[in-house]
Image (spheres, rainbow, N blue to C red):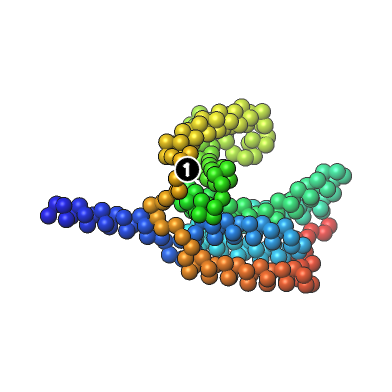
Amino acid sequence: MEAVSADADAARAREAIERFPPGVVGLDARTKLLLIVVASTVCLACRGEVTVLAVLAAVVALVAAGGHASIGLRCALAYVVLNLVIALTAAFHVPGLSALLLVLGFTLLKFVPVVALAWWFASSVRTGELVTALGRMRLPKTVTIPVAVMVRYLPTLGQEYACIRDTMRMRGIVASFPASLLHPLRATEFVLVPILMRCLKVADELAASAVSRGIESRASRTSVRDVRLRVRDGVAAAVLAAFVVGVLAVDAGPAGQVVVWRISL
């Protein structure tokens, strides 16, 4: 009886591991990479602000459906703040500085949807699944290993920064962004230097972890989950193609010339 119970528990555990989440959450890593590439290309190729707004709205809806609504809301808020900064910079003209801020601001605006997708990708894709998916695309390890390390490294770096910020608060040091702007030298001493030291240590730890898990092995990579393209991935690709055609058609028309944010004094 104990053997039968153990086999049943093992079967349930295997089924729970191999079961992919439904809907957008369970999209293959290659499909999510395709979304990032297409979104970045469309945002850079489009001329109008309405087009970027349409892409951002679609990305926020997609990320929210993928279980990370906070990421979409934060990026949407960043988009609004950047637009306000650009509008105020254009209204209060400062020779030299205004032109620099306008060029930088408009460039960053185009990358807000891409940042949201990349953030969602790093938060929802497991490293093992990513390496397996990239390996099935016949990509060399000189490509798959750096991509996997980068995806794993960014969330770890965020956790390290949170730990440093909590330590500063325990010692009575203000760790907010405005305080860093007002006191750049202190921010460099208390934030930047510890982060750089932790980056070196985390890089060594990730390298040792990857080597211990056989990342240098020449054998084909496997995964505990069934990593493959499903019907939902085909549907996502078809919806993406239709959306791109529609966005480019709007951008080529009169709506592509509309300026949403403008302040006149």
Give the quarter of the figure containing the C terminus. Answer: bottom right
Name the residue located 44 percent from the left edge and 57 percent from the top edge.
227
Q: Nearer the viewer, residue 242 or 84?
A: 242
Q: Nearer the viewer, residue 164 or 91?
A: 164
Location of residue 252 by image quarter: bottom right
Residue 201 versus residue 98 in the image, above or below? above
Name the residue located 48 percent from the left edge and 47 percent from the top edge.
127
Secondary structure at badge 1 equals loop
Residue 178 in the image: state x and y as whole percent. 64, 39
Give the quarter of the figure containing the N terminus. Answer: bottom left
Location of residue 219 by image quarter: top left
How many marks the image carries: the answer is: 1
Name the residue located 69 percent from the left edge and 61 percent from the top edge.
42
Residue 257 versus residue 220 in the image, above or below? below
Residue 207 in the image: state x and y as whole percent. 49, 35
Residue wearing tag 1: 218
Residue 199 in the image: state x and y as whole percent. 55, 33
Image position of 50 (left or right of 95): left
Q: Nearer the viewer, residue 221 or 255?
A: 221
Q: Amino acid type of disc 1?
A: Arg
Question: Can you name the residue that lies furthest to the front here?
Answer: 218
Name the residue located 47 percent from the left edge and 51 percent from the top edge.
132
Residue 199 versus residue 227 in the image, above or below? above
Q: Which of 199 and 260 is in front in this view?
A: 199
